[in-house]
């Protein structure tokens, strides 16, 4: 008699969630391991057994008390994870239980399990580990949206990236060069500059030793697009190096958001000043970004033309040490938490 396939055994969902909470605004020591009841996926959502979670600068700012989660989001830090789908909401057809995915979250990633919007789950690219995949969503969504959707960087144009050795920076270098743009970066050491060159940047300027405005002027360079996560006085200086019809996009303000600038270059060169935050945007907006990434960027990853740069990994319960490393700014690329 023909044998019939045995039905798949659904994964066991434990009753408790292992996680890292923020005890109160403060330094890395306020990140405390804890347990909570297991969350359940609602309409349009999936539950992921987390293998790894990316650590990002917004997590640090949230821990410090300056970046509260949007309404309805988890209060736990963590904006990106990779793992296996173990439960789905009643109306979800994709991804399915058993699929390995990486996902963009609005919070909750520092945990053994996380709820994600189904449209914001992407398949783990062929050839990447779950740890590497966990380093993709937050950086790629951010770079794709700001550099390619909002600032509309095109092949043959020039991109200036401040913070070139960061997770965002190392991703932006690789993606921009893969899509035909020329890249210049600023970074804070010779080692970081060398890493940026190895990833495809044409020039890397050590801002501790050189004035990037002077370097641009002496070399006759201009930037069609500036990706700025520094802010402060960098914004006024950026205007001096931007090309006619240039686009400047801010995604963070390490040196502050309140500035005074001369608007004359904006008028004379017809510049565009742009900015965005990713976390509070509607799922529909981010689903559009996910579709663009899957169509354009996933093939580049699977062809080996873009690879997340993992500087260090820490076990989930050592999230405080991961944050201390991020705040030291000694890392090149991404820091990732792993879940046993």
Image (spheres, rainbow, N blue to C red):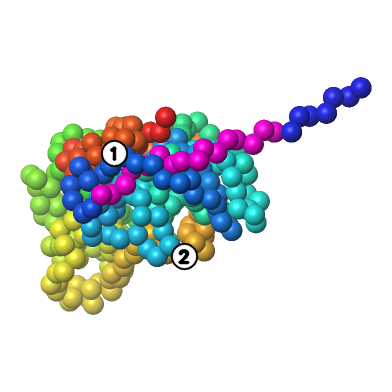
List x then y, in percent, for residue 172. 34, 48
Work out whether 49 lies above or below 1.
below
List x then y, in percent, for residue 3. 85, 24
Most foreground residue, 161 or 77: 77
**How far apart in space, not on screen, are marks 2 and 1 (Cα)?**
28 Å
As helix, strand or loop, the secondary structure at mark 2 comes to loop
Circles 2 and 1: CB distance less than 8 Å? no
Residue drawn at x 49%, y 61% is: 283
Residue drawn at x 76%, y 29% is: 6
Left or right: residue 131 compared with residue 249 = right
Which quarter of the picture shows residue 306?
A: top left
Work out whether 213 lies above or below 298.
below
Residue lying farthest to the top in this orientation:
1
Quarter of the image with the C terminus is top left
Residue lying farthest to the right in this orientation:
1
List x then y, in percent, for residue 150. 39, 64
**Residue ID for mark 2:** 282
Left or right: residue 106 compared with residue 56 = right
Q: Would you say residue 15 sits in the magenta stretch?
A: yes
Number of marks present in the image shown: 2
For residue 10, say whether it is visible.
Answer: yes
Which quarter of the picture shows residue 335?
A: top left
**Residue ID for mark 1:** 319
Q: Would you say residue 238 sits in the magenta stretch?
A: no
Which range is magenta? Answer: 8-23
Residue drawn at x 53%, y 46% is: 47
Most foreground residue, 155 or 141: 141
Quarter of the image with the N terminus is top right
Left or right: residue 61 compared with residue 121 = left
Circle 2 Cα neighbour tier, 10 Å, few/some/many (<14 / 14–19 / ≥20): few
């Amino acid at each position: 008699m023909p044998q019939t396939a045995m039905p798949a055994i659904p994964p066991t969902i434990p009753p408790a969630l292992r996680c890292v909470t923020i005890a109160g605004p403060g330094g890395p020591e306020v990140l405390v391991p804890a347990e909570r009841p297991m969350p359940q996926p609602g309409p349009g959502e999936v539950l992921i057994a987390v293998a790894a979670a990316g650590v990002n600068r917004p997590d640090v700012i949230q821990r410090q008390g300056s970046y509260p989660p949007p309404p309805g989001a988890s209060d736990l830090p963590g904006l990106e994870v990779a793992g296996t789908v173990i439960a789905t909401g009643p109306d979800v057809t994709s991804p399915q239980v058993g699929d390995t995915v990486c996902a963009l979250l609005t919070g909750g990633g520092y945990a053994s399990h996380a709820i994600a919007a189904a449209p914001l789950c992407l398949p783990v690219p062929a050839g990447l580990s779950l740890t590497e995949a966990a380093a993709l969503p937050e950086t790629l969504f951010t770079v794709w949206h700001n550099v390619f959707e909002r600032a509309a960087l095109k092949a043959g144009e020039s991109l200036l990236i401040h913070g070139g050795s960061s997770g965002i920076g190392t991703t932006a270098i690789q993606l921009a060069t893969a899509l035909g743009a020329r890249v210049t970066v600023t970074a804070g050491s010779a080692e970081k500059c060398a890493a940026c060159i190895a990833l495809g940047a044409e020039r890397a300027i050590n801002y501790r030793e050189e004035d990037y405005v002077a370097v641009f002027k002496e070399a006759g360079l201009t930037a069609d697009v500036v990706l700025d996560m520094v802010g402060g006085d960098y914004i006024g200086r950026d205007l001096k190096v931007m090309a006619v019809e240039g686009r400047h996009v801010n995604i963070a303000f390490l040196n502050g958001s309140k500035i005074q600038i001369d608007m004359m270059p904006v008028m004379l060169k017809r510049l565009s000043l742009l900015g965005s935050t990713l976390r509070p945007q509607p799922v529909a907006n981010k689903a559009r970004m996910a579709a663009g990434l899957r169509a354009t960027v996933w093939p580049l990853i699977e062809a080996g033309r873009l690879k997340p740069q993992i500087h260090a990994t820490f076990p989930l319960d050592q999230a405080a040490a991961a944050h201390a490393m991020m705040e030291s700014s000694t890392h090149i690329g991404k820091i990732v938490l792993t879940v046993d």
